[in-house]
C-alpha cells in the first residue's frame, strides 16, 4: 500500500479560506452505496433517519497561536509560539519560530498577564511552563492568543477575530484542542434541534485534536507510518448510548474523523467501552470497523492519514470516484470547506 495510492490533483482555488455562511449552507456530497448526489448540509433532516445516533466531538479549540518577546540584556526579539498539547511533566509542548535562537531557561512574555519559561528545548519543539494555571491561564490565553488556523489557511491569510467563532463548534465544551473537529463546524443550534425533534439522537465524546493531525506522511509504505497520539474520553453514559443504538438496529454516525477514531479505539471488542487516555489508532484500508455505520466529514488533503481513513471506510476506488466528483463539481476543500456524508 503506497503513499501515492492516496494522492490526487487539487486545484489551489478549491481550498476554502472562509466557511460558508450560514454554516448549514455548505454543500454536502452524499455518497450512499454506488450513488452520489449533490445536496446541502441543511438537507440532513431529509437524509438522516429516526433512531440514527450522531457522535459529536465536544472539544473546544484554544487560541493556541501566541506572539511574544524574549529579552537578552537590552535586546528584545519577537517570537511566535504555537501550543501543541499539555504535557504530563507540566506545561505545554509548543512550536517556536525561530526555534534555534531560543534557550532553555528564557522567559517569553506574551502580555502583561501571561508569560512562560522555556523548561526544555528539543530539536523540533519546546516545553513551556506558564506563570498562570486554571481559569487564570484560560482567561489570559483568550486575551493574548489567536486561533490556530491550519497551515493551508494560515499560508493564505492571518487569523482574525471572525475565526474565534468560525473555527469553533456550537457545542464546544472541553478546552484542549489546537485544531477544530471541522465536520462539526457545519451545525448550528437550529439544525441540531430539528434533527432531535425528528428522532435523531446525539452522543458527545471528547478528543482533543492535536497539531499532529497536520503532519505529513513521510513513508512510502503507509503501513509503517507512526500515528500521533491524542487524548480522548468516552464516558460510561456515552458508551451505553452507542451500545443501545447498535442493539436497536440504529446507525452510529460519527461527525468527523476525530469522533470516528475515538469510538473505534473504544470499541475494538465490538462493544463500546468507556475510555480515558491517549489513542494513536491508525485507520487505513483493511481496517475492521466495529462501531461506525457512516461518516460525516470534510474533504481531506492528498496523501494524508485522513484520506487513508475514508478509503478504509468506503474502499479506495470508491473514494477516488467521490473525490473526482468533488473536484469536477468544485466542492470547497479542507477545514473551512464543504462536507460529505459517506455511507458504505
Image (cartoon, rainbow, N blue to C red):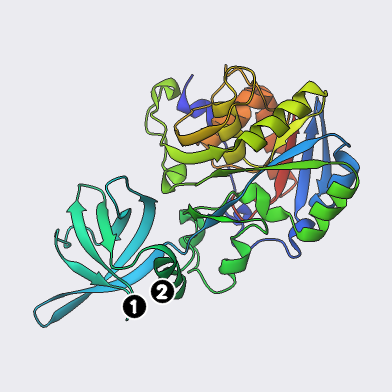
Tell me which residue sits at (45%, 47%) in the image.
210
Answer with left or right where residue 167 lies relative to residue 2.
right
Q: Which mark is residue 113?
A: 1
Nearest the eye: 298 or 90: 90
In the rendered image, the vertical position of residue 29 relative to residue 153, given as above or below: above
Tell me which residue sits at (88%, 41%) in the image.
199
Q: Position of residue 8 (x, y in %)?
A: 57, 36
Determine contact: label 2, label 1, CB under 8 Å.
Answer: yes
Answer with left or right where residue 151 lies relative to residue 56.
left
Tell me which residue sits at (61%, 39%) in the image.
259
- Local secondary structure at mark 2: helix
Q: Position of residue 141 (x, y in %)?
A: 42, 69
Q: Position of residue 178 (x, y in %)?
A: 46, 54
In the rendered image, the vertical position of residue 199 relative to residue 120, given as above or below: above
In front: label 2 or label 1: 1
Q: Which mark is residue 144?
A: 2
**Residues at marks 2 and 1, CA–CA distance in whole angstroms:** 9 Å
Q: Position of residue 67 (x, y in %)?
A: 34, 71
- Local secondary structure at mark 1: loop
Q: Where, quadrant-wise, is the C terminus in this rendering?
A: top right
Answer with left or right where residue 202 lies relative to residue 236.
right
Amino acid at each position: 500500500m503506497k503513499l501515492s495510492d492516496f494522492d490526487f490533483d487539487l486545484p489551489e482555488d478549491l481550498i476554502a479560506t472562509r466557511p460558508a455562511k450560514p454554516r448549514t449552507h455548505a454543500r454536502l456530497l452524499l455518497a450512499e452505496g454506488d450513488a452520489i448526489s449533490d445536496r446541502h448540509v441543511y438537507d440532513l433532516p431529509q437524509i438522516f433517519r429516526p433512531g440514527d445516533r450522531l457522535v459529536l466531538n465536544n472539544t473546544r479549540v484554544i487560541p493556541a497561536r501566541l506572539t511574544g518577546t524574549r529579552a537578552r540584556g537590552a535586546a528584545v526579539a519577537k517570537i511566535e509560539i504555537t501550543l501543541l498539547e499539555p504535557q504530563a511533566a507540566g506545561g505545554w509542548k509548543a512550536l517556536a519560530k525561530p526555534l534555534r535562537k531560543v534557550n532553555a531557561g528564557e522567559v517569553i512574555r506574551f502580555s502583561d498577564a501571561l508569560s512562560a519559561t522555556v523548561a526544555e528545548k528539543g530539536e523540533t519543539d519546546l516545553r513551556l511552563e506558564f506563570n498562570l494555571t486554571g481559569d487564570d491561564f484560560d482567561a489570559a490565553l483568550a486575551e493574548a492568543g489567536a486561533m490556530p488556523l491550519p497551515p493551508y489557511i494560515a499560508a493564505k491569510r492571518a487569523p482574525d477575530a471572525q475565526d474565534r467563532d468560525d473555527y469553533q463548534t456550537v457545542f464546544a465544551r472541553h478546552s484542549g484542542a489546537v485544531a477544530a473537529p471541522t465536520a462539526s463546524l457545519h451545525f448550528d443550534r437550529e439544525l441540531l434541534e430539528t434533527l432531535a425533534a425528528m428522532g435523531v439522537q446525539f452522543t458527545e465524546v471528547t478528543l482533543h485534536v492535536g497539531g499532529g493531525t497536520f503532519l505529513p506522511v513521510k513513508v512510502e509504505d503507509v503501513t509503517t507510518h507512526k500515528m500521533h497520539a491524542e487524548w480522548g474520553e468516552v464516558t460510561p453514559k456515552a458508551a451505553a448510548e452507542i451500545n443501545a443504538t447498535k442493539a436497536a438496529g440504529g446507525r452510529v454516525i460519527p461527525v468527523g474523523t476525530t469522533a470516528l477514531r475515538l469510538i473505534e479505539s473504544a470499541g475494538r471488542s465490538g462493544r463500546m467501552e468507556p475510555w480515558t487516555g491517549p489513542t494513536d489508532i491508525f485507520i487505513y484500508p483493511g481496517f475492521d470497523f466495529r462501531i461506525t455505520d457512516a461518516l460525516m466529514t470534510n474533504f481531506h488533503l492528498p496523501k494524508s492519514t485522513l484520506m487513508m481513513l475514508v478509503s478504509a471506510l468506503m474502499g479506495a476506488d470508491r473514494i477516488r470516484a467521490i473525490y473526482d466528483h468533488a473536484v469536477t463539481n468544485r466542492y470547497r476543500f479542507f477545514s473551512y470547506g464543504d462536507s460529505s456524508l459517506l455511507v458504505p
